[in-house]
């Protein structure tokens, strides 16, 4: 019994050390890109700023881009998945968008790092595109959750195979379509590059500078716009 606590804490300590190093490298990479621009930052520069060797860097990240946008793909935690499936009502649109926009690291979002990445995405759209492509890795997971949500209340005794195939098609179509919608929402959320990273109501040229939307505001605006667009006759 005396050895049990020591044994159980060792993996956790290694994991904490790994996470701390990874986070330090990510922060260094992001800071360097904000200072010098994406094309001017090298792996050597990131290693020097992080106090690690190239060998260590490549143990954590496959590429410079991975260190900048984060190595871990977005995930849906079990609690969010259960909440989505059990959510009251039949209004899937905001619920699916909310589920997808909430995906993030398991230990939560590091606000400054997250904000700096938002700035980088605004300055370097190719990095935003790569991040959105990584989102497609969880498409199957989201589609399955949508399928389960659509299946609520279905009488499985009377349901046919054709019904299940149709529902799978609905779930996949909605998920793929909303990936594009989510990208649009992200663009509304990211600061406009020509105005810099922070909102400033001052007007030097007579134009009002747009303020950056909160995530909730971007989600609400996107859902409203999508509903209005889909209600146009002929669509």
Image (tube, helix red, strand yellow):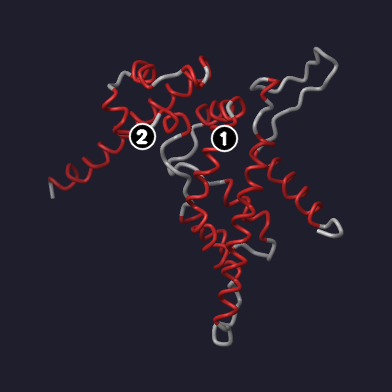
Residue at (59% x, 64% y) in the render: 171
Determine whether 132 is above or below 153 in the image.
above
Residue of label 2: 62
Residue at (43% x, 33% y) in the render: 66
> Residue at the left extreme?
2
The CA span between labels 2 and 1 is 18 Å
Residue at (70% x, 21% y) in the render: 194
- Circles 2 and 1, Cβ within 8 Å, touching? The answer is no
Tell me the element at label 1: helix
Residue of label 1: 128
- Residue 70 image offset from top left, x and y in percent: 44, 35
The answer to whether residue 66 is left or right of residue 159 is: left
Q: Callout 2: few (<14), some (14-19), or many (20+) C-alpha neighbours within 10 Å? A: few
Quarter of the image containing the C terminus? Answer: bottom right
Determine whether 88 is above or below 152 in the image.
above
Tell me the element at label 2: loop
The answer to whether residue 131 is left or right of residue 5 is: right
Determine whether 29 is above or below 59 in the image.
above
């Amino acid at each position: 019994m005396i050895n049990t606590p020591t044994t159980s804490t060792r993996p956790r300590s290694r994991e904490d050390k790994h996470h701390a190093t990874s986070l330090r490298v990510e922060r260094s990479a992001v800071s360097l890109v904000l200072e010098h621009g994406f094309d001017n930052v090298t792996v050597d520069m990131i290693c020097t700023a992080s106090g690690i060797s190239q060998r260590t860097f490549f143990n954590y990240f496959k590429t410079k881009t991975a260190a900048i946008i984060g190595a871990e793909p977005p995930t849906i935690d079990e609690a969010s998945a259960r909440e989505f499936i059990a959510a009251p009502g039949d209004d899937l649109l905001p619920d699916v968008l909310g589920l997808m926009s909430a995906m993030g690291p398991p230990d939560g979002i590091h606000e400054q790092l997250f904000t700096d990445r938002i700035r980088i995405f605004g300055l370097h759209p190719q990095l935003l595109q790569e991040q959105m492509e990584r989102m497609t890795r969880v498409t199957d997971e989201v589609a399955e959750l949508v399928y389960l949500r659509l299946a609520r209340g279905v009488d499985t005794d009377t349901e046919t195979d054709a019904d299940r195939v149709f529902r799978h098609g609905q779930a996949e179509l909605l998920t793929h379509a909303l990936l594009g919608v989510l990208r649009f929402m992200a663009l509304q959320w990211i600061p406009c590059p020509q105005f810099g990273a922070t909102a400033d109501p001052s007007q030097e040229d007579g134009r009002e500078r747009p303020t950056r939307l909160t995530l909730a505001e971007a989600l609400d605006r996107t859902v409203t716009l999508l509903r209005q667009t889909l209600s146009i006759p002929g669509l």
